[in-house]
Image (spheres, coloured by chain):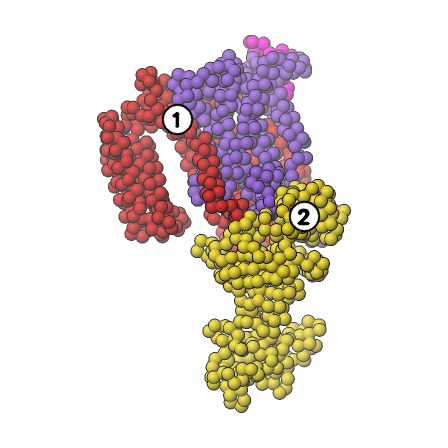
Chain colours: A red, B yellow, C purple
Amino acid sequence: MRADGAVDLAERPSEDAAAAVPGGTVLGAPERELTAATIGKSSTRRTLGLVGQYALLVVLAALVLVPIVLVLIQALSPPFPYLDAGRPLHPVAVEWKDKGWLDGGAFSVITRTLVVALALAWVQLRAAGGRLSNPAPLLSPRCLVAVGAGVVAVAAFAGQIWQASVDRSGTTPLWWLLAIVVLAATQLIGFGRLRQWWQPVLLAVLVGIAVTAGVVVAFGASVWNRGWDQGDIGPAMGRSFTLTVLITVAQVVTSILAAYAFAFLRFPFKTLVFALFMATLLLPLEVTLLANVQTIRELGWINSNAGLVLPFAATAFGTFLIRQGFRGVPPEVHDATRLDGYGHMGFLWRFAVPLTRPVIASFTVISALGAWNQYLWPQAIIDDDRQQTSQLALKNIAGTEVANSNIAIAAALIVALPVLLLLIAFSRQIIRGLTAGAVKG
Amino acid sequence: MASVTFENVTKRFDDVVAVDALDLAIDDGEFMVLLGPSGCGKTTALRMIAGLEGITDGKLLIGDQVVNDIDPARRDVSMVFQSYALYPHMTVQRNIESPLLVRRYHADGPDQPARKLSRTERSERVDEAARVLGLDGLLKRKPAALSGGQRQRVALARAFVGRPKAFLMDEPLSNLDAKLRAQTRLELVDLHRRVETTVVYVTHDQVEAMTMAHRIAILSAGRLQQVGTPQEVYDVPANLFVAQFIGTPPMNTLTGAFTTQGGPAIAVGESRFPVPADLKTRLDEGRTVIVGARPEHLDVSEDGTIAHDVRAVEWLGHECLIFGSVESSPVVVRQVGMAPLAAGGTIRLAVDPANVHLFDPETTERLA
Amino acid sequence: MTTAARLLRRRDRPRYSAKEMGIALALLAPSIAVFVAFFYRPFLNLLNWGTFESRANGAFFEDVGLRQYREQLTSDDFREGLWHSVQFVLYTVPAGLVLGVLLAVAAHRRLRGIKVFQAIFSSTLASSVAVTSVIFFYLLNPVVGIFQVDWLTNPDWAMFAVALSAIWQNMGLSFIIVLAGLQNVPDEVVEAATLDGYGPVRRLLRITLPLISPVLLFLLVVLVIFGLQAFAQPDILTNGGPAGATETLVFKINRLVRPDNIGIGAVYSVGLFFVTLVVTAAQFVILERRVHYAR
């Protein structure tokens, strides 16, 4: 038995059952199209059916996205005084930060360029059939040219759009159109593999719109800076980050240790103790709030990291989840390691943990998500505005910046960004963790 | 009851051709088995009959009617899925009744329009199906409370209750243990005899095919290899694939050359295989062929013309299997009774020319 | 493992080894410490404090026993808080279930670009209660909002408006949970239903929904608990107003975090605990029968 845990079992399919669906979708779809439902229907009816399905999806997507989009538009709109004079929903005079792509300091320029380049590279990679783990298709000349040309196009036109917006000139829509078309054209260079003629065109146009809008909004408007500064969310984000790391590490470690005890050790009253562990789920913070606040006060831990981290240093949910994972380790593996002379700790660190990496990863991400988003507890024990977490800073801003709604919204979106990135990067793990209790795997 | 006919039917999934120009006529009342290894297209073909897969090219007929574009629920066929696909939340009774609730049937006669069944009619049919399949007393249970064999019978009852023109079965025995499988095989054959409905049965197990089928259609990589009665495919395999797929242990195949020295024979090194009578005069000297002989047709004989180096002998009680090689090609011999042979020795084998099969090395087709 | 092997295994090992117990204790100690310190002990304290009446100057009176419990749990204030929380539940839970099913059923199919829609549907998971509340604060703000409605300042509509933000936020979680349930419905069962002539609506109602009922029950329980514990939304959106119209139970408890009210606060906390417990248990008992579990 190898010490690095590199046993064949490391890639057992059962761990990925929730996400490993044919077709490569993260969230899963039926294995086969329900052909039976469409056979016998005339092709008109079939097309209508298809259109109807897409229409429903679009309506629902709108339901989800509309609040964000509206609020984003508002963020990019000028503040209160302008709204007095009528109710324009689209930007009238937005403060666009830099006038050209190369303004704003080396750091900004490099970051911007890199982000755009990476985004375009990712699109080209996926369109060429590759994945992050297999970047080879990206290195073909046409893809590289597409990415390069795309970056140049964005740099050239973004500046123009910003300029036009600042000058409030009527040519702004024209620049937008030009930017989208040129960008789409550059991306088409790299698309070779898609089947029907309209697919690459559609994709290129979508990418054009998305990247142009993203660049203009994210890097152009000054509202993000103002949101950051005026809302003073820098220190708050920092505090949230520290606390998130501490809480996540604490939860993962204590959960692994406790889960190991329940899964691999024998001791009296194990069932009872486990039940007591799970019973804590019935005592959420909302119920024990007052007493816990009192405890923290008595210990003098108001505003302190200890007070913010320790009550969450252990969680029954984590113990449950990881115990499930440990139970998936075949007993034969455990026996083999005992024969090879590994003690409990050796087995834990070299076999149990590596073999349940997916579950532990799921829990880590969910734990981090929860820690970043915490509201009730920090709100209860932080009384110094300078020591707030990011979520509390939002409440402050919402209260004080009522007139400057765009600042507040920008701040909220910035605070939501880390979690959004986590969600995008680790959606599979998050979904697996959240549905572990709902569906018997 | 009706025939099922594939006329040049092709099924393509994006770039993959699952079924390639299939021409197959299944007779009314016949028990047809679609046999082949995984991925050969047999399940796809079955699902096309049911309407669960669309047809890319060609025509599919049930009876005289082209059904390519007919709603699955209107084709008057029923299907037994490999996993049985019972509704877990419904009782056995409701499961069996399910096809009768929404579909329309020609209850008044084949020429009368199809209509929905009344409650009494449904109840009668369900009771009949339950009786025929021995499910009395289980009607109020849910599938979770049944054994594997019982669940399978519920699936059969559900298929039976609509009195379809054809039963479609997708490897229905594969989830049963060996003993139950053997028993259920007999019951299925029995059921078919009583009901006389066309059955299209998919399996990868040639034993099931050989024992149950009126005719077997063997498929490989989407193409039909041969269709014939079990006897036909056993005695006269149309190509190398069929020859090696049917029969356990599989037919021995060796590469040899036709020679007339010392009489017409196929030479494999020093060994000589007799040539079937009708081919003796039709082969060219020196022509390379693939020669096949089934293990059960090889006899250990001192006058045999085939030299066999024995590697191992397995005694199975009533017969034994002799493993070895002829000119470094593996050859298995099956013999009734015990052969007092030692590993490492050489024996001589003989075979009746009628039991020798010759195949073209390039096309793998049978030479005839 | 066969029964024989299992018996042999058990007989082979000694009863409990002290060393193993010691290790177990060491491994469980951190969690136990946290649970005792921040879950069990506080709860027991609360139970106790509920029996102490205190005066404005923070001094404790002696034990008044269960009288305070009786008084406070039947007080208008408590019932109002409870009612507001229940209102929140009534607004958010049915909507959450329906939307979850709608989103999941719409997105559980093989269409081009379905992954994009799935990503969009699950995106509200990324929004915390604070972020959501800020978003809706500005959507619904009567003066600066995009929809300049007076919902947040109208006592009759305030709770609904507050709940609206939670309904939106819950869409992501509901979608993911119901979708996971849909994935566990075997394709062949749905095909069998189609062969039986079931149309899409009938398939949904008679086959799909019953087969995902365990997942729906789970979602129901989770959403109800979220609803009963609602705090951040009223806190940010309306600060409990207008005129206390959105003061949920937890909101009230949060306000009682002061030494002079701790007895009352404790009673409310314990009340919340029992309400949640009873409601959750009731859901399981009543609905367990109608939920179908496979195997």
Q: Position of residue C126 (x, y in %)?
A: 45, 33
- Residue at the disc numbered 2: B107
Q: Which label is found at residue A71?
A: 1
A304 or C245, nearer to the observer: C245
Q: Secondary structure at mark 2?
A: loop
Residue B357 shows in this picture:
yes
Same subunit: marks 1 and 2: no
Q: Is residue A267 magenta?
A: no
Q: Secondary structure at mark 1?
A: helix
User: Residue, x 52% and y 37% (percent of image)?
Assistant: C104
Q: Position of residue A439 (x, y in %)?
A: 58, 40
Residue type at mark 1: give it: Val
User: Residue, x 57% and y 24% (percent of image)?
Assistant: C90
**Which is closer to the viewer, label 1 or label 2?**
2
Q: Is residue C225 above or below residue A340?
A: above
- Magenta residues? C47-63
Is the residue marked by circle 1 packed among few (<14), some (14-19), or many (20+) residues within 10 Å? Answer: many
Q: Is residue B111 above or below residue A108?
A: below
Q: Chain of mark 2?
A: B
User: Residue, x 57% and y 74% (percent of image)?
Assistant: B252
Is the residue marked by circle 2 packed among few (<14), some (14-19), or many (20+) residues within 10 Å? Answer: some
Q: Position of residue B159 (x, y in %)?
A: 65, 51
